[in-house]
Amino acid sequence: MISGDERTGDKIEGTGGLSYVLTPTMSVSGGYTHVNQGAVAKFFAYRRESFNVGHTWLLGRGQFLLSSFIVNLDRYEQPDLTVSTEYRRDDTYRARVTYGIPLSFIAQSLKDMNWTFTYEYYQRRSARTKQRSQHVPEWISGE
């Protein structure tokens, strides 16, 4: 039986990114993160490449719009032989938009508070490949 101890391992993470102010009310940003997650049971160990972009827009009168898109690509070191002899690949995609408006439009006493509306789309795809090479899984190639 698998225990939490088998997931224990060193984690090395490096992140870099850039931000650019387009106008006094708008900025964009982007970043990259690389993660090496070790584990006692090697089928829990993985390498992650993560990419993100973001956009901030101040709309006036205290209103704002935030948007972001993140992609995580996880590649596991060894197959979990209790499940399959193939290597696991997990790809996650997340898009998020948030609109905010001050509550002062309801009552001036609420001027220091915001009301936010957020929509998020999340998709996860998991595939198993025979090799650790750059094999294209069926869900991408349509085979």
Image: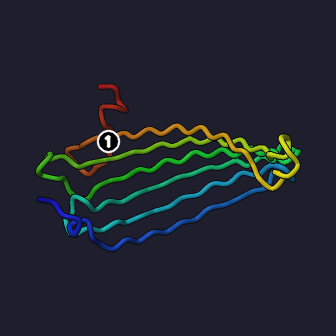
Q: Is residue 139 above or below residue 24?
A: above
Q: Is residue 6 above or below residue 26?
A: below
**Is 25 situated left or right of 51 in this image?**
right
Left or right: residue 124 versus residue 79 is right
Horizontally, is 86 left or right of 50 in the view?
Answer: left
What residue occupies the far bottom of the structure in this picture?
Answer: 10
Nearest the viewer among 115 and 62 is 115
Query: For numbered disc 1, what is the local secondary structure?
Result: strand
Compare residues 127 and 116 and report the one nearer the observer. 116
Residue 74, x across and y down, in percent: 37, 52
Residue 85 lies, in percent from the top left, at 13, 47
The quadrant of the picture occupied by the N terminus is bottom left
> Residue at position x 23%, y 49% from top?
87
Q: In which quarter of the image is the C terminus?
A: top left
Q: Which residue, given by chain and number where applicable, does mark 1 sit on?
A: 126
Image location (x, y in percent) of residue 8: 27, 70
Which residue is the extreme one toward the top? 143
Identify the residue shown where x is 19% and y is 53%. 79
Res 101 → quadrant: top right
Give whichever of 107, 18 is nearer the camera: 107
Q: Which residue is drawn at 31% across and 37% down?
A: 137
Q: Which residue is drawn at 21% across and 57% down?
A: 78
Which picture quadrant has residue 95? top right
Kind of residue sitting beneath label 1: Ser
Query: Callout 1: few (<14), some (14-19), or many (20+) C-alpha neighbours within 10 Å?
Result: few
38 relative to 80 in the view: left or right: right
